[in-house]
Image (tube, grey):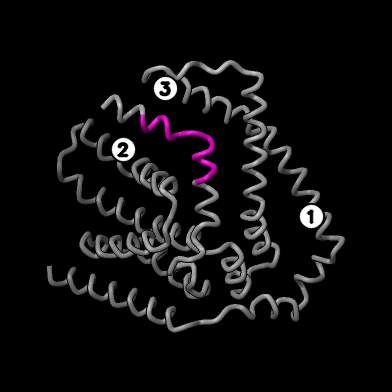
Amino acid sequence: MRKLSENILDKISIDFLRNQVLKNAYGNDDTVIAKLDPRILLVWYLFFGLVPWFLNDVVLLLGIFVFVALTTRAAKIAPLVLFLFCVGVFSQTGYLFIAALFFGGNTETIAPLLVMTLKVAVVSLASITVFSGLDPDRLANGLLWYGCPGQLSFSISFAYRILPVLMEEFQNILLSYRLRGNPPHKNGLIGKIRYLGYQVKMIIQAFYPLMLNTAKRSRTTVEALELRGYRYSIQNPEVKKMKLSMLKVTQADIIFLCISAAWVGASIGLSVAL
């Protein structure tokens, strides 16, 4: 157990976190989900992001949860995002069960908490599938097609594109702190825990200069776009038509919707039978 804990702590580093973030943003272009039309995926997300809140049947919610879990796997989401998903679901509902048992509850509290947990999990996995599995430009074009403001769609695309620059700036700030600091030794489990705490402290201290440097870079980018006529281009119908010409509903999109409808129908049938 001690060796396992040390191996886990060895893998947790700034480089590991940076690679996971960049992989999740740019490493999923060849998946089944990434090749689907973003307009179809946004409609799919509206269904799986809203309908579960109005359902209370455990079997039906469990069937939908299995399906969105399969779509998340097909999108090849980075393990870090899935870990944060598990932590988020537990922080939303899991602690309530522990608190209920601590204050005199019993096993009857499992059913309503399980329903709530499944609702949160289904909506979260659907969000991860769409917003982490799609290429940022395709996601922005899909929102633009549905009438979202051009500034909003551009902000999404720009946020993903500036992510490598942001991570590089973050790494430079951490390296400057390391040159001036005196990190603790990593000998043994206690030493690794102290070193992990030292890294967390550096991350917190690096947040403010990171935001300032990012704001400066963003301002420079916006000024360059203004000089190139960006404000006029996003209001030009011809430019918008050109940007959206890449969107096309294919046979794969129809098959994906049919599989989704069939899975939900089968889950409803199983719920009624039980």
Find out whether the residues at labels 1 and 3 contact each other: C-beta distance under 8 Å.
no
Is residue 167 found left or right of 50 in the rendered image? right
Position of 74 relative to 250 (above/below): above
- Label 3's element? helix
Quarter-wise, where is residue 61 in the image? bottom left
- Residue 202 in the image, given as x and y percentages of width and height: 58, 26
Percent of width and height locating residue 212: 73, 37
Residue 190 painted magenta: no
Q: In which quarter of the image is residue 129?
A: bottom left
Is residue 135 shown above or below 20?
Answer: below
15 drawn magenta: yes
Q: Residue 222 carries which label?
A: 1
Of callouts 2 and 3, which one flags the residue occurring earlier in the amino acid sequence? 2
* Residue density around tag 1, few if under 14, some if 14–19, many if 20 or more, within 10 Å: few
- Secondary structure under tag 1 reads helix
Identity of the residue drawn at 44% across and 57% down: 128
> What's the residue type where badge 3 is placed?
Ile
Q: Main secondary structure of the magenta part?
A: helix
Task: Tell me the quarter of the image containing the N terminus.
Answer: top left
Q: Magenta span covers which residues?
A: 7-19
Q: Which mark is residue 95?
A: 2
Residue found farthest to the left: 274
Tell me the kind of residue under disc 1.
Val
Q: Who comes first in sequence, dot 2 or dot 1?
A: 2
Structural distance between the alpha carbons of marks 1 and 3: 42 Å
Along the line of sight, the residue nearer the viewer: 127 or 268:
127
Front-most of residues 88 and 136: 136
